[in-house]
Amino acid sequence: MKILIAPDKFKGSIDSITLCKLIQQEIAAIHPDAEVESFPLADGGDGYSAIVKHYFNTSDAQVLTVDPLGRQIKATYQISKETSTAYIEMAAASGFALLAPHELDPMKASTYGTGLMILDAIKRGAKEIFLGIGGSATNDGGIGMADALGYMFLDKNGDPLEPCGENLSSITEIVMPETDLLEDIHFTVAYDVSNPFFGLDGAAHVYAPQKGATAAQVDELDEGLKNLDTVFMKFFGRSVEVAPGSGAAGGMGGGCDVFLGARLVPGVDHLIAAIGLDHKIAAADILITGEGRLDEQSFQGKVLGKLIGHARAHGTKLYAICGDSSMPIKDLNALGVDRLVTFTALAGSKEEAMVHPDKFLSAAIKKIL
């Protein structure tokens, strides 16, 4: 029997590399003769940098930058001097996890710190930059990042604006960078969700409440992104309203498309191709995957949703181990999940499952196999 292990992280609980090791140990105890391989994954959000280092033998690069509220911090990204390639995880500077719950404020939060990380990578000689977006505390359409790279945003009076969510609606003019810093730099953005830039399914309406926005602020942020897209049409001649991934990370996807000329790709698709995972899935009898919370968003560009297509294409059974799930098993079966076990069901509470996932892993593996 060939078993493939390929989960995402369980956000706020356990990283995918550790999870793979623990699952492999448990399978070995139950089925010592099974042929087992592990491939930890990330969708472009939190944990992207660690996964890149795991597969591509990159080196740490530390940079002085700022958090979403402008406070000075140190952040780390990955760089390969041999290939002049940098891999940057947006969450390292602009992430949700950098703020305390009472500090969450997508009106004030900015992606400026991510821009500083990109700037540092360019100064170190990077000619190709992969940017994993997701897990952000921001909803600024990428204007903070752009500001750090030399763009300027003006209001109707010609005065510069602070690059944050609350000022999106006030932008009437974009001033281009004075240098050719971004020329000859190839950008690829790995996104974790495929929501549009604005609208009821867009960045603000779907994700801003999780980042601390009130109902009134959600409407304001949505209108701000709509205005930014209008300004994009005026100064760049194109809209990113419905471009796949444009609404990811508070509109960061759309901003990277316009300001960086980036190619936007589903993060897990890029990784699956880079490590040749599809061939491994084809040869396996069972694929075990999972994530922290299984819900409708899991099928909008995240790891589990993407792997279902690969498993179905090759007739490989797909089993899911998740922290929690909001979907009925019959619906999941119809979508391609053959079996599901959740830590919450085994632990009796979501809190216990998150704090001690390792305690329930043995039971989960026994149940699912």
Image (tube, rainbow, N blue to C red):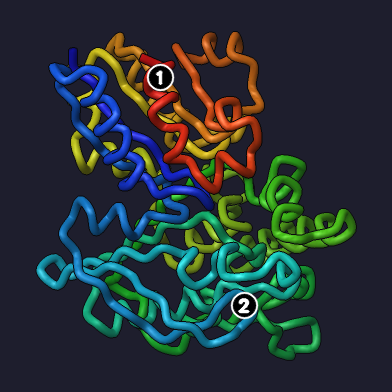
Q: Is residue 312 visible?
A: yes
> Of the residues under marks 2 and 1, which one precedes in the sequence?
2
Question: Residue 71, how many percent across, how many down?
Answer: 58, 85
Q: Secondary structure at mark 1?
A: strand
Q: How many marks?
A: 2
Mark number, residue 75: none
Residue appearing at x 64%, y 16% in the figure: 328
Identified at 43% across, 16% down, the residue is 367
At label 2, which amino acid type do we have? Ile
Residue 236 visible from this viewpoint? no
Task: Give the spatial CA distance, label 2 vs label 1.
Answer: 49 Å
Please provide percent x and percent y for residue 39. Answer: 26, 38
Residue on which the image places disc 2: 174
- From the top left corner, tell me how far across and down residue 55 is, in percent: 20, 51
Residue depicted at 43% across the width and 82% down the height: 74
Q: Nearer the viewer, mark 2 or mark 1?
A: 1
Q: Relative to residue 35, is residue 142 depicted above or below?
A: below
- Left or right position of 330 against 24: right
271 relative to 333, above or below: below
Outermost right residue: 216
